[in-house]
Image (tube, rainbow, N blue to C red):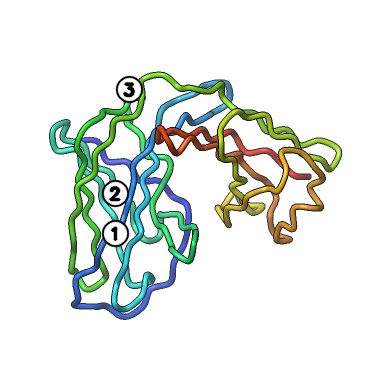
Amino acid sequence: MPVIIFLAGLFPFTSCSRVQPSIEYGFISLVYYQVKNDITQRFSFFVIANDDDGIENLDELDLYNDYEQLHWIIGSTDWMTFTQNDKTWIGSWALALQSGEDLPRGQFRAVLRNKGGEKTEKTFSFDAPAENRFPFPKLEVSGGAYTITSQYPDNRFVCYDSSGNYVSVMKPASPAGKVSELSLPSNIRSVRLWAEDSLYFTSALTEAVSLR
């Protein structure tokens, strides 16, 4: 049974709750993930999670495909977060199979646990199209300027520090412009382009590009 752990963010440890956490909403989407010149398939899985002691009390988010006997583990020191419309999402966009095979469709089961050992479950369906509707996007940075070439409806920058650690996600105001006008934090050294087709639950993530 493959187990894939994707490292990304970092959260502090706090007190443990004996109250069951909850999953308010979530989604699974297909990510076309670029590694050098190779494009592979990965899962993006995020949920809006709640806990009476705060999101920092959450400990682990697991995703199961019981039919295929697959299990992915996303620990609190591993997951990524982003905030949208005052809601905080937790999850990962790089869940894959160790064999590199295409990802299965169908029913998935999410299990969310907090540090007190309480858990909740929620079922998700995933049925992304077999073929991508858009060409793979491109991000270029040169001479202090950036250019996004993408037919995807929604495009964002995923920001990393000098050690390659994930820091944040931000939406550029324009598909081209000066890096200095992005108002990025001073510790950001590289970015990836996250291009999304939310209607068909499909995304693309480019390789990291240095801003220097």
For marks 3 and 2 on the same chain, the one whose residue lies earlier in the sequence = 2
x 26%, y 71%: residue = 115
Q: Residue furthest top?
A: 131
111 lies left or right of 33: left
Q: Quadrant of residue 4?
A: top left
Using the rendered view, name the quadrant where residue 132 is placed.
top left
Where disc 3 sits, the SS reads loop
**Which residue lies under the disc numbered 2?**
73
Nearer to the camera, 47 or 15: 47
Q: Residue at 27% of width from left, 78% of height from top? A: 16
- Which amino acid type is marked by label 1? Glu
Name the disc covering residue 2, or none. none
Disc 3 or 1, which lies upstream in sequence? 1
Contact between marks 1 and 2 (CB within 8 A): the answer is yes
Q: Residue at x 41, y 47 (%)?
A: 92
**Where's residue 208, x and y in %?**
62, 38
Q: Earlier in the sequence, mark 1 or mark 2?
A: 1
Which residue is tagged 3? Answer: 101
Q: Position of residue 41 (x, y in %)?
A: 41, 28
Residue for badge 1:
60
* Residue 204 picture location, percent across and down: 51, 32
Left/right of residue 168 with respect to residue 88 in the rendered view: right
Q: Nearer the viewer, residue 55 or 95?
A: 55
* 6 relative to 83, above or below: above
Give SS at disc 2: strand
Rendering coords of residue 49 (x, y %): 32, 62
In space, the residues marked 3 and 2 are separated at their CA atoms by 19 Å
Q: Split into 4 quadrants, where in the image is the N terminus?
A: top left
| Mark 1 secondary-structure assignment | strand
